[in-house]
Structures are given as structure tokens and as C-alpha cells.
Amino acid sequence: MDSQYKIIHPVKYLHDHLAQDIRPDGRQFLSFRPISVNVSSITRADGSAVFKIGNTTVICGIKAELTTPKVETPDCGFIVPNVELPALCSPKFHPGPPTEEAQVITKLIEHILINSAAVDLKNLCIRKAKLVWVLYCDLLCINYDGAVIDACVGALATAFKCLTLPQVTYDPNNGNISVDRKYKIPFPVKALPVSTTFAIFDGQLLIADPTDDEESLSLGKLTIVSDEEAICCIHKPGGIPVSQDLFIKSLAKSKRRADLVRTLINTAISTTEEKFDSLDKNTILNK
């Protein structure tokens, strides 16, 4: 009966819950869904991660390729992010060209990478004006249930933290390139950006980590991205204005949330590294 009421009167269903200071999934207004992180899930990628917030799930795979640098930045490599929201992740999407939302999130991810300076593009240079790495970062959403920007940023940041690149030797005399894929070097990451999304309802009611239903029925959304030291990006795609008090409240909440997410990511990576170290030792002992 409850599910039928939700389908027939979705707005009233949500507002009835909010009027009782509770959300449909039982959370408080400023509580978050659980997060899970899986590191190095794609064996053919140079860095990968699965990031899950509640039911929202995003897979990120980073593939590194050698190329010539751009003329305007001869000592820098470059990063090409791409977000996909396929039909399998939600009924709201259909097969075909990239949706407007996917394109907006892709540009937002690119903007976050630049503003956060999480990656020093000079570290991708092998030989100035001759050879650099280009990192293709594919982000695939396999389950869409709100806060997809948060999941994309989390998956990308985690994939960067576990990114390793093959050792490359460039001979300036003849231009020969030698790639040793058996010896991989961890890629340095300067910062770990974390995204936190809020939904806004009547009376300046703020809700953290909204589900898809809450996002679609809200009067506005606000996404705050921060690294360890500063705010990298604030994204507010239209909707009602946000009061100063509400904005300060969301900033404080996002900062605490970001610290917890970073701890979770670092723990997942260190646990995976310990597991691989243990496997390597066992392999050596068994030989």
C-alpha cells in the first residue's frame, strides 16, 4: 500500500514524511547513506575503483596512453574525463548519444580536477615537447539513485590514488620509446577532492545526500567539492536561492563528511596494498 501511494502521489508521499522530520528511507535530514569503496577492480586499467553511495554506484577506470603534448603546454600531459549514464542505470535514461546531464557532469569533473590541482600535469611529461601521458578517465554509472556527482568524484579520486604508470624510456637521439610494463611507478596525487550534495525544499529545508526521488522533487540542489585545504568547486544548477545560514550549514557539514570519506578511501587503498604485499610474499615462498 505504501509503495502504491508513493507511485500515485510522489510529492505528497515525500512531504508527509518530511513533515514528520523523517525521510522515506528512515534517515534524518542531514544524515548520509553508507559508502563502500572497492579498489583496483578492473585489472586491465592502470587505476580503477568502484564507489558506492547507498544504491548509487559508479565504476571508474583510468587508461594511460603515450602521445605528443599540446603545443601550448609542451611540458604537461593531459586528462580526458568521460561520464556515462547508460540506460541500464536508471529508467530516466535511454540508449543513444550522451545525455545533457552526462555532459554537464563530465565538464564539472574536468573543472574540479583543474581547481583542486589534485594532479600535477607536469608529472605526466616524459620528454618536454616530445612525449607525455594522456589519462583517459571513464566513469560509468551502473546504478543511479541520487548524488551521482559525489559518486563520480569519489570513484575518480580513488582511482587516481591507486594509479600506477609503466616505466618509459625515451631516446632523444632516434626517438625510440621503450615501455616496461613489468615495472610500474605509483602516480603522485597532491589532493583528494570529495563532493557532497544537498537538496533544498520549502522553507529552506536542507537534506544531505539526496536519493533520486528526493532530487527530482526538490526545489534546488547544491554540490560542494573540497580537498584537504580548500573548497574546489560549488555547483548549484538553478533552483531557489540558498540563504546565507543554510550555505554556512552545508559548508560545515560537507567538510566533516569529506574528512570521513578521505579516511575511508585511504583505508581501502592501504588494505588492498597490504593484501597484494601478502600475496607477493606467498608467491615468493611457494617458488
Image (spheres, helix red, strand yellow):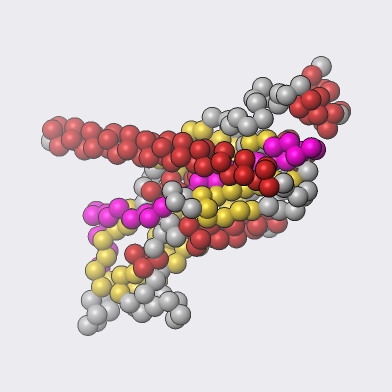
| Percent of width and height locating residue 122 | 36, 68
Residue 232 in view in this figure: yes
Q: Give the residue at x 40% y 66%.
A: 121
* Residue lying at 51% horizontally and 61% vertically, measured from the top left: 115
Which quadrant holds residue 189? bottom left
**Residue 149 drawn at (x, y percent):** 59, 47
- Image quadrant occupied by the N terminus: top right
Identify the residue at the far top of this view.
1
Asked whether 179 falls inside the magenta stretch, the response is: yes
Q: Position of residue 259 (x, y in %)?
A: 46, 40
Against 114, residue 13 (above or below) is above
Evaluate whether residue 88 shows in this view: no
Left or right of residue 143: residue 200: right
Tell whether 10 sits left or right of 27: right
* The C terminus lies in quadrant: top left
Q: How many marks?
A: 0
On screen, residue 81 versus residue 3, left or right, reads: left
- The image quarter in which residue 281 lies: top left
Residue 102 placed where, x, y %? 64, 54
Q: Tell me which residue sits at (30%, 74%) in the image.
A: 127
Q: What residue span does the magenta drawing correspond to?
A: 178-206
Q: Main secondary structure of the magenta part?
A: strand
Please tell me which residue lies in front, 264 or 54.
264
Question: Is 247 inside the magenta-drawn segment?
Answer: no
Nearer to me, 116 or 148? 116
Q: Nearer the viewer, residue 83 or 267?
A: 267
Q: In the displayed structure, would residue 113 be above or below residue 192?
A: below
